[in-house]
Amino acid sequence: MDLVHLSRSVPELIEIDRLAGDLPRGMRVRILDSVIHHGVELPIHCFEAGPEDPETPVFLLTGGVHGLERIGTHVVIGYMKTLFSQMAWDDAQQDLFKKARLIIVPLVNPAGMLLRTRANGRGVDLMRNAPVEAVHNSWLPFVGGHRLGPFLAWYRGGGADEGTMEKESSVLENLVREKLFPSRAALSLDVHSGFGTVDRLWFPYAKSREPFPSLAEVYQLSALLDRTYPNHIYKVEPQSLNYTTHGDLWDYFYDEHSSSGPGRGTYLPLALELGSWLWVKKNPRQILSLLGAFNPVIRHRYQRILRRHLALLDFMARAAASHQTWSRIPKVERKEITEKAHDRWYSGFSGELPSHAGK
Ligand SMILES: [Zn+2]
């Protein structure tokens, strides 16, 4: 495929490549790996700023896990443009990266974006692809992940390869293991679209309706967001409140991190689920187009969405840098905070509360 064709099929890759060629001071870029699709090499870029010390607090921002959800990658690219420009003149922005690391993978699934599919080039839904079995079944058949085959969405992959993850999933796993696991405090945010009418910030689990162990930390982070942006638009909640799935990559990374031994830092994997049904409600005709259900079609709405999340992404980078505010929870307060979190998010759940969380 030539450059002209590529720019027409995946203009996002051209945009990412352009950003990679014009980095501000302090920003680095590397290609994590490439996906070969019909003989064309599609790179997965990774941008990084901040100290090399592996214990540095870190914020990982990812987009484009689902190829159909182009707007997620656009939100990430929009943030990168603002950030790169700020880094060129704003010393305060540069100072942030003296104490925190920012890692950005704007397009995890370039073949899916090329093909305009949710899945990757092999028909596998990357967000159903991890070796995680749901504890509670999804209320929708198939949506939670299945092994019937790639002809139906939400395919977990498998068959003869069962247990091995797709290349894109492994690339992400290697990155998370290398950069997030050794960190004192790590936040990740994976941008998606296609569910509901409000913008949601989801925390684990996807596999289970049980409270996840870092409940106190996520409650503190959410409270910090409320204090900092009292009029913010996000609904913070566990993903399982909406539906459960097999094979969620972030569930997998979180559990692997938790079992990686004593002395580990805090890790909160979050997802930003853009409420695309609202765009459809305001412009019902767009549901008729394949991409329209997942992406804003009208220009002013598109621009508003690119602006809308800049403050959140900036907040996340700062929250990683100053993680003590939400990650250091005195023992005497933990029980009370966990109970508050339970009342807020799991009042319908009668199981046991996590007795200890995070560190
Ligand atoms: Zn998605």
Image (cartoon, rainbow, N blue to C red):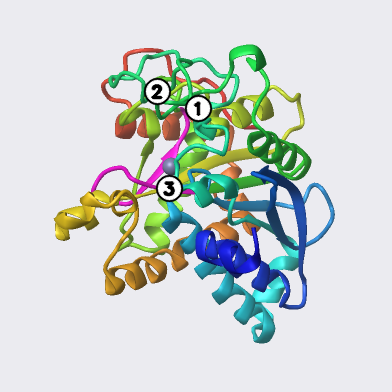
Q: Is residue 11 magenta?
A: no
Label 1 CB less than 8 angstroms from ligand 1: no
Q: Which mark is residue 144?
A: 2
Q: Are marks 1 and 2 in contact (CB under 8 Å)?
A: yes
The range drawn in magenta is 191-205
Q: Is residue 192 magenta?
A: yes
- Residue 201 versus residue 336 in the image, above or below: below
* Element type at mark 1: helix
Q: Which residue is mark 3?
A: 68
Residue at 66% in and 17% down: 161
* Element type at mark 2: loop
Badge 3, how many Cα within 10 Å: few under 14, some, many 20+? many
Label 3 CB less than 8 angstroms from ligand 1: yes
Please name the amino acid that badge 1 sits on: Arg
Q: Nearer the viewer, mark 1 or mark 3?
A: 3
Question: Where residue 303 sits in the image (x, y, percent)?
Answer: 36, 73
Question: Where residue 69 sits in the image (x, y, percent)?
Answer: 42, 50
* Element type at mark 3: loop
